[in-house]
Structure formats: C-alpha cells, structure tokens
Image: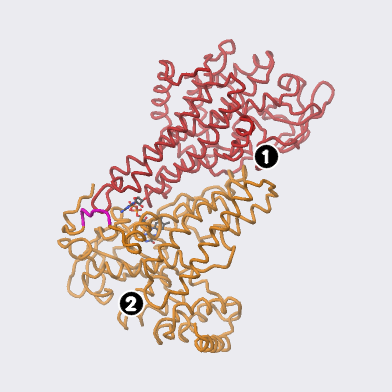
Amino acid sequence: MTDTDYRRVDDVVDELFARHPPQSTEPEEFWGAQYDLGLAWVWHEEGFGGLGLSRKDQPHINWRIEEAGGSTENRLSNLLGIAMGAGVLTTHGTDAQKQRWLRPMFTNQEIWCQMFSEPGAGSDLAGLSMRAEPDGDEWVVNGQKVWTTLAHVSKWGMLVTRTDPESPKHRGLTYFVVDMEANGIDVRPLYQITGEAEFSEVFFNDVRIPDENRIDSVGSGWRVSLTTLMNERVAIGGNTVPRGSGRIAKAVDVWKRSGSADPLLRDELIHLWAEVEAARLTSARANELASAGVPGPEGSIGKLAWADLNKKITSFTLDVMGLEGTLYPGGYQLTRPTSFDTSMPQKAFLRTRANSIEGGTSEIMMNILGERVLGLPGEPRVDKELPWKDVPRG
Amino acid sequence: MSVSYAPTEDLELIRTTARQFLEDRIGLETVRELMMSEEGLDRGLWKEIADLGWTGLAIGEEHGGAGYGLTELSVLLEEMGRLVTPGPFFASAVLATAAIDTAGDDVQKASLLPRLASGEIIATLAVFEEPRGWDLPSLATTATADGTGWVLDGAKPFVLAGQQADVIIVAAGFDDGIGMFVVPADAPGLDVTETPVLDPTRRQADILLNGVRVDGSALLGGGESTISLRKTLGIGTACLAAEQVGGSQRCLEMSVEYAKTRYQFGRPIGSFQSIKHRCADMLMKTEHAKSTAYHAVRVVDDDDEFAIAAPLAGSVCSEAYNWIAGETIQVHGGIGFTWEHDAHLYLKRAKASSLLLGDARYQRQLLGQAIGL
Ligand SMILES: Cc1cc2nc3c(=O)[nH]c(=O)nc-3n(C[C@H](O)[C@H](O)[C@H](O)COP(=O)(O)OP(=O)(O)OC[C@H]3O[C@@H](n4cnc5c(N)ncnc54)[C@H](O)[C@@H]3O)c2cc1C
C-alpha cells in the first residue's frame, strides 16, 4: 500500500473510532458504521462497503480495530458470507443485490451458508443434480444438498442448481441466493466425528426462488461457483497470521507444560514450527502480490499446506500428551455446537481431519496446482462434453 | 530359528469362528450402542465370549483354559480389531492374564486363572502414572510392608477397563523394585473413577489408592517382578499390534470398496491415481504390519528375539494403523468425517491404541536397545 493510501485509510479509521468508540459501541452498530465508511471490504466500490483500494489494505484496518479493542468477530461467525458471498456479489451481482445483501451480511444480522455439495457431487461440483425450473418470474427448486456448514443459523444460502440437464455439465448450471426460511426447505443436522453438527443436510421440496435472486445469467452458474471457491480457498489458506500462532502455539504450549526433555519430540516440534513458518511466509508473500478482485489458483497452495500441517501438528500434540492424549474430557455429546472452539487438543485432532476435505480436497488442490498453475496435461475426461444426463454415476 | 507363518487348521478355525461370532453378535451397530452406553460392556456378551473359550484361550488346561499360545490369542485380537470390538478383553484376557501367568506363583495362578478363563472375573493391569512414562520410571505408587501384608498408596490415572474390572493388578514400587499386587476392586481405600476417552470403545478409569491393605499373598510371585512386568507389556504390545492389523485390514477394505463404487467426474474415484496409489500404499503397510505382528506373537518364548520383535511390531503396526485410518477418512471425503460413518471408530481406536503402551517413538527406543544401537 502506498503511503497516501495508508494515510487515507488511517484517517477514515480515526473517523470511525471518533464517532463510534470501538470498546463501547455495540458490535452490530460498529460494523454498520464500518461498512458505511468503506472499511468493511476496502477494495469494494464506495457505497458497497469499500473505498476502491486494494484487498491487501484490509489486514491493516482489521489490525487497527482489534488493537483499539473493537471486534472483528463477524469475519469468523459469518465467514462464508463475508469471505465468499461478498466476493460473489461484487463480481457477479447487480447493484440492487449488493444494496440488499452486503450491509446486513457485514453486521452479522444475516448469516450466510454455501449450498454446493450434494451426496452425488462433492469434488465434482459441476456434476450436481439439484434441479431448478422456471415458473413465471420464479424458479422451483427440488433436490438435496449436504455438508452445509451453518445452514441451521443462516438467513441466506448461496445455491448452485442445474437448469439444463441436456447441456454438458458445466454449461447447465445457474446460481441463486436462497432465503433459508422459504417454504419447502428442510434442514437436518449431520453429526461429525466430534459428535457435533456444524453442518446439515438440506432438502428442497418445491422451493420457490424469485428470479431477482438469480446471480448472473442463466447457465453461468459454474463461473459464479468458481469465484466462490477461489474466495473460499483464500479465506481458508490465505490468512497471514502472526508468527508461531494458532495450532503450532498450542503444540509448543503443550510441549512446554509436559516438561519433556525428549530430544526427539523437540526436534519434531521445531520441524513443524519451521514448516508452519514457511507456509506463513508464503501466505504473506502471496497476499502482498495479490491485487483486488478474484484470487487466482495459487490460493490452493495455502489451502493444501495448512490442511496438511494442521493435521500433523494436532496429531503430534496428542503424542506429546501421551496417555493424556487418549482421554477426551467432557466425552462425546451429539449436539449443535455453539462455537468452533477447538482449544482442546483431542477435539482439534479430530476436527482437523476435515481440513483436507472441506473447501475442496487436497487431491483436488493438487490437481489445480498441477493443471492450472503448472500447465501439466489434465486427466483424460470422460464426462466433459457429454450431456450431463448421460454422465456415468456408478 | 525357523518360524512358520502359514495358518494352521486350528488358527483358521479360530479365525472363522471368531469372525462369524463377532459379525453376528457384535457388529458395528452393537459397537455403537456399547460405545455410548454407561458401562461400555455387555456382561451377557462377555459371558458368551467366555463360553466360547476366548478368555481362556491362552491359559493352560490345568487352569481351565484351552492351552493355546499367543499366536492363537492374537488371531482373536486381530478379528476384534477388525470390528473395533468394545470391552475389556485386551485389559483382562491379555494384560492381566499375562501378568499373572508370567509373575504369579502356582497358588496365585490356581486361584486366579480359572476364574479369568471362565469369565467369572474381569481383571486389568494398572501400571502407568506419567503421560509418557511407558519406560516405568520410578513409580510414585508405593507398597509398604505392614505385618504380613502390604499397604498401597498412589494414583493410576490411565487404567484400561478400570471400572469394569473386578480385580486390579497394581504395579507399585517397594524396596526391591516393582511389585505387582492383586487388588480386589472393592478393597477399602480404592477409588475408581471412569474418565471419558478419545476411543470410547475402550474405557479407562482414574484410580486412587489410599492406604489400600492387601495380604502378603497378593504380591505376584512373592517379590520383585520388573522383568515379568516388562515381558507382560511386550506381550501386550504384540497383541495390540495384532489388533491394529485387524483394524488396518478393515480400513483398507472399506477404502477399496468405496474407491470402486464412488463416482466423481463420470468415473470411479479409484481410477484416479492419487486414490489408487493410496490404496496400494495401504495394502503395503497392512502387509508389513501383519508380518511384524505375526512374527512377534510366534517368538514370544524366545526372549532375545521377542525383545526385538515386540517393539518392531509395536512401532510398525501403530504407525501403519494411524496412517491408514486417517487416509480412510480422506478417501471417503465428507462422508468419512461423519459420526454416522464407521471410519472415525477406527481413527479413534488407532490413535488411542498407539499411545497405550508406548508410541512408535518409544517402541523404536526399545528396538534400538534390543539391536544394540
Ligand atoms: C467439515 C466440512 C464442512 C463442509 N462445509 C461445506 C459447506 O458449507 N458447503 C458445501 O457446499 N460443502 C461443504 N463441505 C463439502 C466439501 O466441499 C466436500 O466434502 C468436498 O468437496 C469433497 O467432496 P465429497 O465429500 O463428495 O468427496 P468425493 O468428491 O467423493 O471425494 C472422495 C475422494 O476422492 C478424491 N477425488 C475425487 N475426485 C478426484 C480427482 N479428480 N482426482 C483425485 N482424487 C479425487 C477426493 O480427493 C477424496 O479423497 C464440507 C465438508 C466438510 C468435511
């Protein structure tokens, strides 16, 4: 960021703080004011939560807010909206759509979820079956989504559907924003290996979506989905965190408290720390290069690296705990979790097993890096030019 | 030294009977019920298992057992590992039984082994005190002579099947080293609290000993028994390795089955090399695990070779199982991360079992000593 940008951003931040003291203002009100001043997504246009600056100016703003005792908690509790939905709306949405959805998204009044995956379509998202058929100025939607994180608390869902089964699979998709309170939507909890249900199965039975909630043109759902996924990968893998923080900090902490004098464990811990630092510096370097707009396929490097590291670190942490690692304080309860807290190492070990699956599997990340970044030839495709209805499904 | 790994008729019979019984009576549905139940054990099933002769399989005929050895016993463990069978079998029929068998005198054996064989009592072994104290550093639990008996004081926070056991064999330090004391679960001063565990198919308890009095006859072998205790833990490691083999094999089968039937991009996911190669890797690791576990149980009577074979199996099998169980989730994608799918039962069993008697690093330390490195 240039010096003038810094000064400009800092001036606006000062103005925000002066009018809405971060420590004493209700978060919702503070986030509203932050949005109105263009500090929500600083790279957005003015009027839509931004100042038309660069994506990489945002961390500085977040840092200033946190330092002043304000909250950036909305970025976590409405992660799918703020990190992904917003990018979709700015890239593909109409002004009316941005007007309607961005502000309450940022203030956390309306939570968003992502309804892409289906029982038959995970990695092969473009193979999905959920059907949307036009009916006047509405669409009628039938089918099932699965693994929908936060569906049970969401107001809006990002939804990809099939509108043309005769076309090859990538061409017959259309993207909508659906009201999760609409008639015909049934959200059922799906429990994960921790016993908690962060995600759900969502059944659609003749759900009606007004055409004004369609994002981009009919048949361009694949393009909009890709924008969503690119934003997702950056959201998952692209954050620049402070050195030695997060899961590796926990591992270091557990190791210190164990009083271990075992040189083997120490070496492994330092090895992990070094790998984390390499990944962290890579994220920092990539963020610096990234400009405004849609993130590129390089985002998959961070996603791939953190998935692997999180799994290794949390497994190692249990080893350091030895027999204590075999305990599970509190036991397993089949519940809807109220937080994503994984400070308990045993739970972190279990939860991180999904890191190499959620948001695109590590195998898919490697395919993207191999094919889209390195330009290696793709696998022979049996499904690409076939009408979707004729693709083999096992 | 020539060891044969080919399955004998007896071994085949034990395996097929065990698989049949486990699949019919303790399938994964039942495993889930027991896993979430209060006691984690169905005493009726335990009786059935005992009546089949499993609890006495490796106990001598003179003590009411079937007189088989570790090789036969390990087949049961392998089959139980395949179905993550819950309950105290490993604690009672392996660890406690081996402790009595290796350290006990004739009178003690005659009094305890028949009751273990018949399933009348469940026993366990309480040894470890420190989270990574598998090498038995000086124990803080002590035995103090008191007239003709002993008084035990200390804490054992990680006792397998502690709450299910009728008899707890407690390792305690005294003048001569480590002794193993047979303590009835209802002894005054003994406090047993169940602790929630990562792998709820295998329960643990936190045990406190507060001035627990036992007779002189409670001390196994009448004296110090560090060597027997180490041998017992080696037997435990070899049996656990067999159990890990069973789990690995089942995970491999689940993964291959899914890779053949799950379609994405118009083809079975097993046609993608990253999945196909992963399955092939699982196969290789499972076969290596089998080889080391089968070898260990067959050389248990050769102390020098067993000192190599047990930690070899312990390190190879627990690493294999941890990796395979983790990759089984990966091959299954989202569905593998659900409570409903069975993959997590194996993941939890794999991780916990690799920490029970010493992780792979610790096993390699033992191996290093045994091969003179
Ligand atoms: C905790 C969690 C939260 C989630 N939240 C959401 C959400 O909010 N919204 C949503 O829409 N989805 C969500 N998902 C779903 C997630 O995106 C999918 O699980 C993921 O894309 C994988 O799809 P799948 O589960 O169908 O596995 P599959 O695609 O069936 O994959 C099975 C295995 O095959 C491999 N594979 C598949 N294709 C290839 C290939 N071409 N080359 C090599 N290997 C391949 C995979 O890598 C995997 O190992 C979530 C998942 C989890 C675990």
Establish if B362 lies above or below A218. Answer: above
Rendering coords of residue B39 (x, y %): 55, 36
Q: Answer whether residue B213 is magenta in the image.
A: no
Q: Which one is nearer the viewer's eye here, B2 or B44?
A: B2
What are the residue bounds of the magenta stretch? A378-383
Rendering coords of residue B238 (x, y %): 55, 28
What is the display colour for chain B? Answer: red
Q: Mark 2 points at which residue?
A: A91
Q: Answer with the quadrant where ligand 1 appears in the image.
A: bottom left
Q: Main secondary structure of the magenta part?
A: loop
Q: What element carries label 2?
A: helix
Residue B135 is drawn in which quadrant?
top right
Residue type, mark 2 in image: Thr
Q: Are the residues tagged 1 and 2 within 8 Å (C-beta)?
A: no
Residue type, mark 1 in image: Gly
Which chain does the residue under circle 2 lie in?
A: A
Establish if A334 lies above or below A292. Answer: above
Neighbourhood count class around disc 2 (C-alpha, 10 Å): few under 14, some 14–19, many 20 upward: some
Residue at horizontal 20 percent and vertical 65 percent from the top: A172
Which chain does the residue under circle 1 lie in?
A: B
Q: Which one is nearer the viewer's eye here, A196 or B225?
A: B225
Numbered circle sitting on residue B133: 1
Rendering coords of residue A340 (x, y %): 51, 60
Establish if B84 lies above or below A62. Answer: above
A239 sits left or right of A380 in the view? right
Q: The orange chain is which one?
A: A
Q: Is mark 1 on a helix, strand or loop?
A: loop
